[in-house]
Amino acid sequence: MSIAFYLTLKSEVVFEHPDATVRQLMERLDHHSLTAIPILDYDGRYIGTITEGDILRRIRQLDGSKGIRDLEKLKVTDLERSKEYQPVRIDANIRDLLYIVEHQNFVPVVDDQGVFSGIIKRSDVIHRLADVIHQSTLPE
């Protein structure tokens, strides 16, 4: 089975660019009720994923309310990522996908040039596998 079956297309994915401020990133996460967001360069290549935890770790390092205002100047690229969200290529096999989705809420999908195609959500994989299990146990 092709992993493309699970793909949420880039056009449906909320993402951010590296020159966005941390404040803009936080607003986007909050507006869309997300806990992590892929970062893409302007050529559409996947750079990495920023999580709420990455932002919170940076906020802890700031100097009170003055530091909070600095989030308007701090860029996404200034954030240290605690975890690398491993992407898969669109031609990856289902076994590769299952190993990665076990450790990530979503898996970024890229083409052979590293251009972001979309994401595969762990919840979609689980729902599909549950459907397959359910169908295979139904009496005929």
Image (spheres, grey):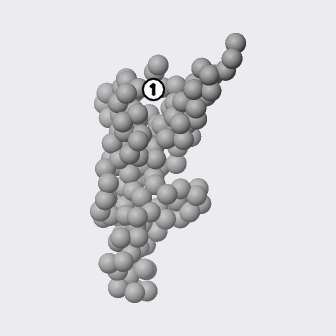
Residue that extends furthest to the front in the rendered view of this protein: 139
Quick check: 13 above or below 112? below
Q: Which residue does the numbered mark 1 point to in the structure image?
A: 3
Q: Nearer the viewer, residue 54 or 10?
A: 54
The x and y percentages for residue 127 are 58, 35
Can residue 40 be seen at all in this image of the molecule? Answer: no
Element class at badge 1: helix
Q: Residue at x 58, y 56 (%)?
A: 32
Residue that extends furthest to the top in the rendered view of this protein: 140
Can residue 38 be seen at all in this image of the molecule? Answer: yes
The x and y percentages for residue 8 are 53, 35
The x and y percentages for residue 52 are 44, 63
Residue 137, picture quadrant = top right
Quick check: 8 above or below 16? above
Residue 133, picture quadrant = top right
Q: Is residue 138 left or right of residue 126?
A: right
Q: How many marks?
A: 1
Residue that extends furthest to the right in the rendered view of this protein: 140
The x and y percentages for residue 26 are 49, 65
Q: Residue at x 36, y 77 (%)?
A: 60
* Circle 1 Cα neighbour tier, 10 Å, few/some/many (<14 / 14–19 / ≥20): many
Three-letter residue code for mark 1:
Ile
Q: Is residue 31 left or right of residue 19?
A: right
Q: Residue at x 58, y 32 (%)?
A: 130
> Which quadrant: the C terminus?
top right
Quick check: 29 above or below 92? below
Q: Is residue 133 left or right of residue 42?
A: right
Q: Nearer the viewer, residue 17 or 122?
A: 122
